[in-house]
């Protein structure tokens, strides 16, 4: 099956971790002109000279035609029709602020970052609006892309489907056409809030699911965490104005299941190590990559308090990560809560 015919579009991808590299690969494979900003000069050099990202996906050949650079100003100033953002949430505001003077006025942005800013409790689309202003960074100029998509499998050409949410149907469709291929399917929705909440919070639940595995508690317990974790994500999303239907889709249930069960999940791996008794600082030092769920736990815990949303799994993950509660005690706390109707989503 041949990919659909599409005009070549100039795209800049900001962030060359595994996910940003995979998205740049998808776009270049689709025939687009791609500039990829890499924080590390060695990553830019490796992509330019060998067609591989030496720090992330080091053993994978990338599509040709990716113009990698470690020069933030040059990447931001590159001619483009679309900016794809894949910088980790904790660095997004700083990097975006540095890049903003170089960005053109007619910018359209796709945020592929799955996280919540801890200091402000803003979703990434909110950070774009803060930094770029309500016109350039407003809801009709920004989309959010999320879904069950391990970067390594995307680059390997394994069939993958994601969702792109935007208040602008035109922008959502535009992103759909740019990314879609015979191995990368893109669905659209009008709910950027739910798309981002699902993508961020699934990492928190994945830490809990990993801890269950590290404790040796079995499949029943993991299934409970996934199911009740989805209920918590839905509750928080509704309080933030999301469409409840989003959480039954790729950016909700789909991404949650993948991240809680897949062996390539960094957040699940953090949880496994916690369940096995390792210290968080040691775990993070050994990963070499950002596990968004740790920072997102802090943000989600505060959001739940401010919005008066009951999120017991998030609370227990927070206590495990930051308050010295053991994973075993956290699970006992969850199981000893008062009984309630399953359909009680309040």
Image (spheres, rainbow, N blue to C red):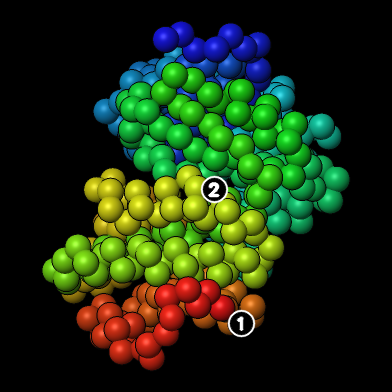
Most foreground residue, 58 or 114 = 114
The residue depicted at 37 percent of the width and 28 percent of the height is 159
Asked if residue 339 lies left or right of residue 311, the reply is left
| 79 in relation to 207, above or below | above
Residue projecting furthest to the left: 216
Residues under labels 2 and 1: Cα distance?
Answer: 26 Å
| 59 in relation to 332, above or below | above
The residue depicted at 24 percent of the width and 48 percent of the height is 263
Most foreground residue, 20 or 337 = 337
- The tally of labels here is 2
Name the residue carrying label 2.
113
The residue depicted at 60 percent of the width and 28 percent of the height is 176
Most foreground residue, 342 or 312 = 342
Q: Residues within 10 Å of mark 2 (few under 14, many from 20)?
A: many
Looking at the rendering, which quadrant does residue 12 occupy? top right
Residue 57 picture location, percent across and down: 33, 33
Residue 254's label in the rendered image is none
The earlier-in-sequence mark between 2 and 1 is 2
Residue 308's label in the rendered image is 1
Residue 287 picture location, percent across and down: 30, 54
Determine whether the residue tagged by mark 1 lies in a helix, strand or loop: loop
Q: Quadrant of the N terminus?
A: top left
Residue 191 is at least partly visible in this image: yes
The residue depicted at 16 percent of the width and 71 percent of the height is 217
Q: Quadrant of the C terminus?
A: bottom right
Q: Residues within 10 Å of mark 1 (few under 14, many from 20)?
A: few
Residue 214 picture location, percent across and down: 18, 66
Looking at the rendering, which quadrant does residue 318 occupy? bottom left
Residue 52 is at least partly visible in this image: no
């Amino acid at each position: 099956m041949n990919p659909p015919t599409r005009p070549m579009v100039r795209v800049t991808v900001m962030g060359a971790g595994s996910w940003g590299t995979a998205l740049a690969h998808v776009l270049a494979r689709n025939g687009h002109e791609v500039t990829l900003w890499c924080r590390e000069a060695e990553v830019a050099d490796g992509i330019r000279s060998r067609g591989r990202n030496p720090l992330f996906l080091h053993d994978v050949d990338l599509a040709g035609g990716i113009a990698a650079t470690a020069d933030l100003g040059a990447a931001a100033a590159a001619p483009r029709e679309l900016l794809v953002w894949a910088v980790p949430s904790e660095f997004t505001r700083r990097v975006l602020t540095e890049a903003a003077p170089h960005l053109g006025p007619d910018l359209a942005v796709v945020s592929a970052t799955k996280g919540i800013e801890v200091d402000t409790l803003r979703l990434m689309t909110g950070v774009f609006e803060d930094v770029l202003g309500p016109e350039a960074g407003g809801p009709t100029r920004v989309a959010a892309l999320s879904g069950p998509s391990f970067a390594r499998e995307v680059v390997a050409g394994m069939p993958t489907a994601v969702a792109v949410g935007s208040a602008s149907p035109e922008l959502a469709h535009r992103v759909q056409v740019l990314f879609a291929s015979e191995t990368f399917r893109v669905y659209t929705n009008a709910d950027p809030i739910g798309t981002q909440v699902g993508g961020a919070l699934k990492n928190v639940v994945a830490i809990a699911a990993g801890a269950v595995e590290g404790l040796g508690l079995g499949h029943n317990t993991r299934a409970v965490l996934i199911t009740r974790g989805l209920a918590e994500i839905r509750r928080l999303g509704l309080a933030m104005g999301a469409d409840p239907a989003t959480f039954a889709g790729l950016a909700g249930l789909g991404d949650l299941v993948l991240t809680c069960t897949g062996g390539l999940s960094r957040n699940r791996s953090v949880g496994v190590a916690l369940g096995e008794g390792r210290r968080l600082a040691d775990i993070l030092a050994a990963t070499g990559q950002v596990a968004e769920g740790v920072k997102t736990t802090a943000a989600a815990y505060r959001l739940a308090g401010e919005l008066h949303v009951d999120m017991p799994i998030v609370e227990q993950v927070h206590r495990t990560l930051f308050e010295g509660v053991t994973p075993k005690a956290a699970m006992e706390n969850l199981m000893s809560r008062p009984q309630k109707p399953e359909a009680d989503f309040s």
